Image (cartoon, rainbow, N blue to C red):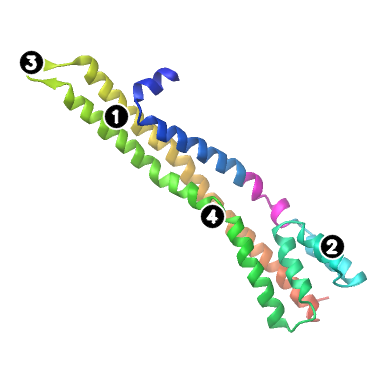
Amino acid sequence: MWSIIQAAGWPIWPLIFASVIALALIIERLWSLRLAIVAPPGMVDRVLGEFRQAGATPELLQKTAAQGPLGRILAAGLANVKAPRPVMKEAIEEVGRVVTHDLERFLTTLGTIAVAAPLLGLLGTVIGMIEIFGSQTAVGSNPIQLAHGISIALYNTAMGIIVAVPALIFYRHFRAKVDELVVEMEQQAIKLVDFAHGERK
């Protein structure tokens, strides 16, 4: 592995750095965007059960808000449970926008790496081509410099693609996952609003 890095030259280091960041972001998002953490199944029913028993107590609001993104949305609804339906929905939507922004955290960075990695690979390719042309002299070519230039060009091109493809795949996956979770939370929040205003039992 070290011999490959040496053969690829200094342009490989930004790609290695980008790959480490991308891997860390992918692992973090895989952990953070699980349904059990964002919108646990049956959570709204449990919250409504406690609400029926004791009402929107400060303890219930605090406990609900501590249960993740969906909990924060439901807590915002419960805090305005006695307000008119439009006011309650507006409070839920305001918190929902913040929660959605939190769910999309780091996705821009991952998408940027997916786009930038091939360009960094292309930079290595250009530097390798410069090495190749530099090996040509009036009396002939320097085979060692020629081989080094080819190594830089090919290794950096390959590394750029290797970093970009998984980053792009996971970026698309996480975008779809966030959309799916937002829809799920919207449905649960609507259930709470309907119950609070007597449209659901």
Q: Earlier in the sequence, mark 4 or mark 3?
A: 3
User: Of the residues tagged 4 and 3, which is closer to the observer?
Assistant: 3
Element under disc 4: helix
Residue depicted at 85% across the width and 72% down the height? 56
The answer to whether 42 appears left or right of 17 in the picture is right
Q: Residue at label 1?
A: 153
Density class for disc 2 (Cα within 10 Å; few <14, some 14-19, many ≥20) is few
Q: Is residue 32 magenta?
A: yes
Q: Main secondary structure of the magenta part?
A: helix
Q: Residue at label 3?
A: 139
Element under disc 1: helix
Density class for disc 1 (Cα within 10 Å; few <14, some 14-19, many ≥20) is many
Return the x and y of residue 160 as percentages of the image width and height.
Answer: 38, 36
Q: Is residue 140 magenta?
A: no
Element under disc 3: loop
Q: Earlier in the sequence, mark 1 or mark 4?
A: 1
Q: Residue at label 4?
A: 175
Q: Quadrant of residue 141?
A: top left
Query: On screen, 125 above or below 184?
Result: above
